[in-house]
Image (spheres, rainbow, N blue to C red):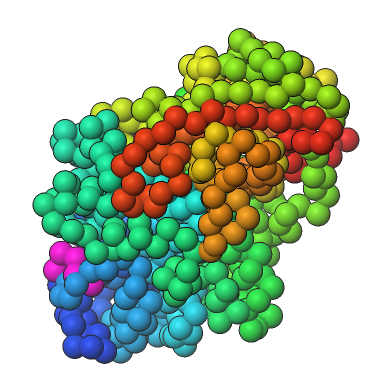
């Protein structure tokens, strides 16, 4: 496949004309810049809107715009407020709903619009749609909001309370300059060990571009869930959204769980039954980018894994904006790819109705350090067992290798790229600051599909620290493929609105939310769980001192203890789907 759009399946119907830099007035007098691609044949057309902070005439967007114009749509691409040719000042997440509403009204009044309007976009292009939805613009007929979350605190910037460093700082820089920072030169400037290790975090903006970035500083200073996040989140507002939504995401993106939470809310909370029955999800073996082939990172999921997402979108828009009875709404609302088995499957509910939440318990004789240790994993509850210990030194953090990472383009240009997706974890498993628990070879296939959680009983010598978890599929030849992961900053273990420091040395229960997945662990494979305290530079290093993440510079080493006994039965909770 090429780096751009592969050859489309549907035929071209029109030549294309281009309307450049149309001034689009907002209610406060600011003019935003909108470029429109539409069929060259005179007439009125259904319109698809994309809003972006990444430049309207980015080659990637132009490819999409031409695709849609050739197939009988007007495709409007707008620079977000304060970006490129749009007036105003950009501040992440705050103006997008209102500006989108005003843009929809402007589009509806244009001579090339036939009155049918849909919205489209990925990542930030999905974000503006979820902020538009609760405002209930009557001229929006459908949305396609892909690879984005409903909760900017818990899914974008503070995963389990741990600050998502790489995504946050690279987004802040990118949003603040009108140039492409994803090229290789950014490794010399930003994506390198020296830059990512600097402290305090609050000053990374000045060190990056020579001035303060207001929203970067606000993200850091609002290090708990509060009104700042409540105002911009979609969480709690789905009951106001009355529009059909198609979501596409990948199991190795940062947002598979959020995608399904959106779906669950949108099938139960909107005011009309029609909307509740008009929600669709496509979840594949992908990360954040549009899939370019059947391979992700080190694993090829087979020829059926690839889907041309633009054609999936086309079925959606042809139905809602052109009225074509193409069967898209006759299918079950969810389509998932079951990794390991490497097949697509339709589902009607989420979580799946036959899910059996099954605990797999940690065991050892007190030496689970590294894959050379004695850690095991089984469905047998522990009795009396010695605990495991490791030393977490923020100066020597565990590196981020693969996983649920949404910083695809930025990571590719890093000094040490964070490749999203399945990557061999054996090198990580050799470290003494990683506890490794591995099952016996499976006697039958085990399907794990749904939300995952790690219930960890642990103690630390520090007032605050992090604990990480990975679910891994160990192949018969020893290859260790990461499947899902999670992290928890201990101070947020009970309430992320009211952080509570640890009592050093005291055993504490920690529920670590992991990313949803669908994986068939094959007979003869082994299930493995890795426990540690860092994943850097994806997440900022916990300095173990209990001080604010924004301003702290003082590093302490933490002595970590993981317990697994009848009193402290540490386990991973797997959503097992029974098979005959």
Image spot of residue 95 (x, y percent): 32, 75
Image spot of residue 38 (x, y percent): 27, 70
10 with respect to 188 (left or right): right
* Magenta-highlighted residues: 81-85
Question: 573 or 238: nearer the eye?
Answer: 573
Quarter of the image for the C terminus: give it. Answer: top right
Quarter of the image for the N terminus: give it. Answer: top left
402 with respect to 188 (left or right): right
Is 84 in the magenta?
yes
Is 11 in the magenta?
no
Image height of 424 relative to 63, above or below: above
Image spot of residue 465 (x, y percent): 51, 40
Residue 265 in view here:
yes
Q: In which quarter of the image is residue 458?
A: top right
Question: 228 or 424: nearer the eye?
Answer: 228
474 with respect to 424 (left or right): right
Name the residue at 73% across, 54% down. 351
Name the residue at 51% across, 38% down. 462
Image spot of residue 185 (x, y percent): 15, 36
Question: 245 or 574: nearer the eye?
Answer: 574
Mark count: 0
Name the residue at 66% across, 30% down. 562
SS assignment for the magenta stretch, majority? loop
Question: 566 or 75: nearer the eye?
Answer: 566
Image height of 368 relative to 420, above or below: above
Q: Quadrant of residue 217?
A: bottom left
């Amino acid at each position: 496949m090429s780096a751009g759009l592969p050859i489309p399946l549907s035929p071209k119907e029109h030549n294309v004309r281009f309307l450049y830099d149309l001034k689009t007035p907002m209610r406060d007098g600011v003019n935003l810049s909108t470029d429109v691609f539409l069929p060259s044949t005179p007439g009125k057309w259904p319109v698809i809107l994309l809003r972006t902070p990444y430049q309207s005439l980015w080659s990637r967007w132009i490819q999409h715009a031409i695709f849609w114009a050739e197939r009988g749509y007007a495709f409007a691409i707008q620079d977000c407020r304060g970006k490129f040719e749009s007036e105003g000042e950009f501040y992440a997440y705050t103006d997008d709903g209102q500006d989108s509403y005003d843009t929809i009204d402007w589009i509806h009044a244009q001579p090339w619009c036939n009155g049918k309007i849909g919205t489209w976009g990925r990542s930030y292009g999905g974000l503006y749609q979820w902020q538009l939805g609760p405002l209930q613009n009557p001229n929006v007929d459908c949305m396609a909001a892909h690879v984005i979350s409903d909760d900017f605190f818990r899914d974008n910037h503070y995963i389990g309370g741990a600050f998502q460093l790489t995504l946050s700082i690279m987004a802040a820089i990118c949003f603040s300059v009108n140039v492409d920072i994803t090229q290789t030169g950014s490794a010399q400037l930003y994506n390198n060990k020296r830059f990512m290790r600097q402290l305090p975090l609050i000053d990374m903006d000045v060190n990056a571009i020579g001035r303060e970035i207001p929203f970067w500083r606000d993200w850091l200073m609002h290090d708990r869930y509060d009104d700042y996040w409540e105002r911009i989140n979609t969480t709690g507002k789905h009951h106001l959204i009355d529009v059909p939504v198609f979501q596409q995401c990948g199991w190795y993106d940062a947002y598979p769980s959020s995608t399904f939470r959106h779906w669950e809310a949108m099938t139960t909370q909107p005011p009309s039954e029609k909307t509740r029955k008009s929600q669709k999800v496509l979840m594949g073996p992908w990360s954040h980018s549009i899939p370019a082939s059947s391979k992700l990172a080190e694993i090829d999921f087979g020829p059926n894994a690839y889907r041309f997402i633009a054609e999936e979108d086309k079925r959606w828009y042809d139905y809602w904006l052109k009225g074509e009875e193409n069967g898209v709404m006759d299918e079950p609302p969810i389509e998932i790819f079951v990794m390991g088995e490497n097949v697509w499957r339709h589902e009607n509910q989420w979580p799946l109705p036959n899910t059996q939440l099954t605990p797999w318990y940690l065991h050892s004789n007190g030496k689970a350090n590294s894959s050379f240790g004695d850690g095991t994993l089984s469905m047998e509850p522990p009795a009396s067992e010695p605990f495991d210990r490791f030393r977490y030194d923020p100066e020597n953090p565990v590196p981020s290798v693969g996983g649920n990472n949404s910083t695809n383009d930025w990571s590719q240009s890093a000094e040490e790229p964070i490749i999203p997706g399945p990557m061999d974890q054996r090198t990580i498993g050799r470290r003494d600051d990683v506890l490794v628990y591995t099952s016996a070879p499976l006697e039958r296939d085990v399907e794990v599909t749904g939300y995952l959680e790690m219930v960890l009983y642990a103690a630390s010598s520090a007032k605050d620290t992090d604990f990480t978890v990975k679910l891994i599929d160990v192949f018969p030849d020893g290859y260790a493929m990461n499947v899902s992961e999670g992290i928890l900053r201990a101070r947020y273990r009970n309430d992320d609105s009211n952080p509570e420091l640890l009592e050093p040395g005291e055993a504490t229960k920690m529920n670590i939310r992991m990313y949803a997945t669908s994986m068939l662990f094959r007979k003869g494979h082994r299930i493995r769980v890795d426990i540690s305290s860092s994943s850097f530079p994806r997440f900022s290093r916990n300095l173990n001192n209990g001080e604010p993440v924004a301003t702290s510079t003082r590093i302490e080493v933490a002595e970590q203890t993981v317990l697994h006994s009848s009193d402290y039965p540490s386990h991973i909770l797997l959503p097992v789907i029974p098979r005959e």
